[in-house]
């Protein structure tokens, strides 16, 4: 076979053709569609009296938590076989859950979104398995994040401009379910199995200690951004800006995230992951400094747009970071789960450091999380460098 026929080289298992790789990634794109429309969908439910203010937060947290747990457990327990059947059945179940929400009240919504998270986690596991096994995982993670963010943006625009204003929350659930069913197309070209990772027999197994440390670093590093993002509008208002400025910052940030994913894809194999983390961290800290001061609306929007670019640019580099810490790649399979759990952890912890008229405590919390996560990442990197150096010296004198 030529490289044209098999452009995606796996570290373990057979090479994949481009259509096979795209199909494997498509399941993850479908699994994350909810992230782009959940604020609008839950907001519509609240406006219709079907969801309380407390239920709003609980629905988002339960879905993210169940998705992260499902992805993590699948990476440890489920052998990477019969992927087409798993993808087909899970996609159908997820769409059915979306349709089942029509006309439902708060209790049913909370149960259904928790179940949806479990199905989404299993679909995401299929994509993560492909990324973790590739020779340049940051490149394919970049492709994935670019595709996922683009799909979320298109669906979010459809929700905001047409579906929710005309058909309400139930119209949103119908469109989300129909969009999910499009994922069935991925079944036809998706590889039916992946090669077993080193030291595993079919399933990945749990990571070693250093892998768990890398996942902890992922958790607190990603949670830093989630903690601050949850309070974007209150931070804007505390700075004397309108809600329209905050909403504009959200849309421009989403557009920049697409560019950030494309840039990460282009830079894969050419930039060290530590460089990506250091540069991105400086940008995040600078952006939070802007958010904590009274600035013009355009400065607030521009700062958040730049930060949005780097929020997705840095995300693919989490995978090579975990692989360096754990060459068996078991931790890499858990990276997506850790990021999802971070998405729930950040807003949860931030709720304890804000006050009704002062939410700027989240900026200190986010900075603390970020610096702590970065310190662990730097420590893991230098430990790996030292280990390789000792191994070379041992080989020299053997």
Image (spheres, rainbow, N blue to C red):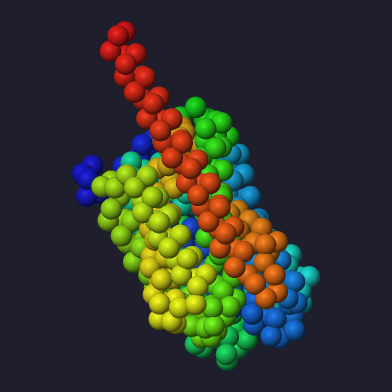
Q: Choose top left, top right, bottom left or bottom right for residue 163.
A: bottom right
Q: How many numbered marks does the figure carry?
A: 0
Reply above or below: 136 against 288. Answer: above
Looking at the image, which residue sits at the far right?
107
Reply above or below: 215 against 205. Answer: below
Q: Where's residue 111, x and y in %?
A: 74, 65
The residue lying at 63 percent from left, 70 percent from top is 359
Reply above or below: 27 against 374. Answer: below
Is 141 left, or right, of 220 in this rendering?
left
Closer to the camera in the image, 318 or 149 = 318
Reply above or below: 135 against 175. Answer: above
The residue lying at 34 percent from left, 23 percent from top is 389
Is 228 left, or right, of 149 in this rendering?
right
Looking at the image, which residue sits at the far bottom?
166
The residue lying at 58 percent from left, 85 percent from top is 164
Is 353 left, or right, of 238 in this rendering?
right
Q: Where the C terminus falls, by quadrant?
A: top left
Closer to the camera in the image, 372 or 36 = 372
Q: Where's residue 348, x and y in %?
A: 67, 60
Examine the rendering and report whether any part of residue 105 can be seen: yes
Examine the rendering and report whether any part of residue 339 can be seen: no
The residue lying at 70 percent from left, 70 percent from top is 355
Q: Where's residue 395, x and y in %?
A: 31, 14
Q: Where the N terminus falls, by quadrant?
A: top left
Closer to the camera in the image, 325 or 81 = 325
Looking at the image, which residue sits at the far top?
398
Q: Where's residue 318, x and y in %?
A: 44, 47
């Amino acid at each position: 076979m030529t490289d044209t026929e098999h452009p995606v080289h796996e570290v373990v298992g057979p090479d994949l053709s481009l259509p096979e790789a795209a199909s494997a990634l498509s399941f993850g794109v479908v699994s994350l569609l909810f992230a782009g429309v959940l604020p609008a969908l839950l907001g519509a439910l609240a406006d219709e009296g079907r969801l309380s203010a407390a239920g709003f937060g609980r629905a988002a947290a339960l879905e993210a938590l169940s998705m992260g747990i499902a992805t993590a457990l699948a990476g440890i327990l489920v052998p990477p076989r019969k992927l087409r059947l798993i993808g087909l059945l899970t996609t159908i179940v997820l769409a059915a859950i979306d349709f089942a929400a029509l006309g439902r009240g708060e209790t049913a919504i909370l149960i259904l979104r928790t179940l949806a998270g479990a199905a989404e986690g299993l679909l995401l596991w299929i994509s993560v398995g492909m990324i973790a096994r590739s020779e340049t995982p940051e490149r394919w993670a970049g492709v994935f994040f670019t595709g996922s963010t683009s799909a979320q943006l298109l669906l979010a625009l459809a929700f905001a401009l047409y579906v929710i204003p005309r058909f309400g929350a139930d119209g949103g659930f119908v469109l989300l379910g129909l969009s999910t069913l499009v994922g069935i197309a991925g079944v036809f070209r998706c590889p039916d199995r992946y090669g077993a990772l080193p030291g595993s027999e079919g399933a990945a197994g749990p990571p070693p200690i250093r892998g768990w440390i890398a996942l902890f670093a992922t958790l607190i590093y990603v949670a830093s951004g989630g903690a601050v993002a949850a309070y974007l509008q209150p931070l804007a208002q505390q700075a004397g800006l309108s809600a329209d400025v905050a909403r504009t910052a959200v849309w421009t940030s989403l557009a920049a995230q697409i560019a950030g994913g494309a840039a990460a894809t282009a830079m894969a194999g050419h930039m060290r992951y530590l460089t990506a983390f250091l540069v991105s961290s400086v940008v995040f800290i600078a952006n939070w400094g802007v958010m904590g001061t009274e600035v013009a609306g355009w400065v607030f929007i521009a700062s958040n747009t730049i930060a949005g670019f780097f929020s997705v640019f840095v995300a693919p580099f989490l995978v090579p970071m975990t692989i360096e810490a754990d060459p068996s790649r078991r931790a890499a399979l858990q990276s997506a789960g850790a990021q999802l759990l971070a998405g729930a952890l950040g807003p949860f912890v931030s709720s304890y450091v804000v006050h009704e008229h002062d939410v700027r405590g989240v900026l200190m919390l986010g900075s603390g999380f970020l610096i702590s996560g970065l310190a662990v990442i730097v420590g893991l990197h230098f430990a790996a460098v030292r280990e390789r150096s000792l191994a070379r010296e041992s080989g020299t004198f053997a």
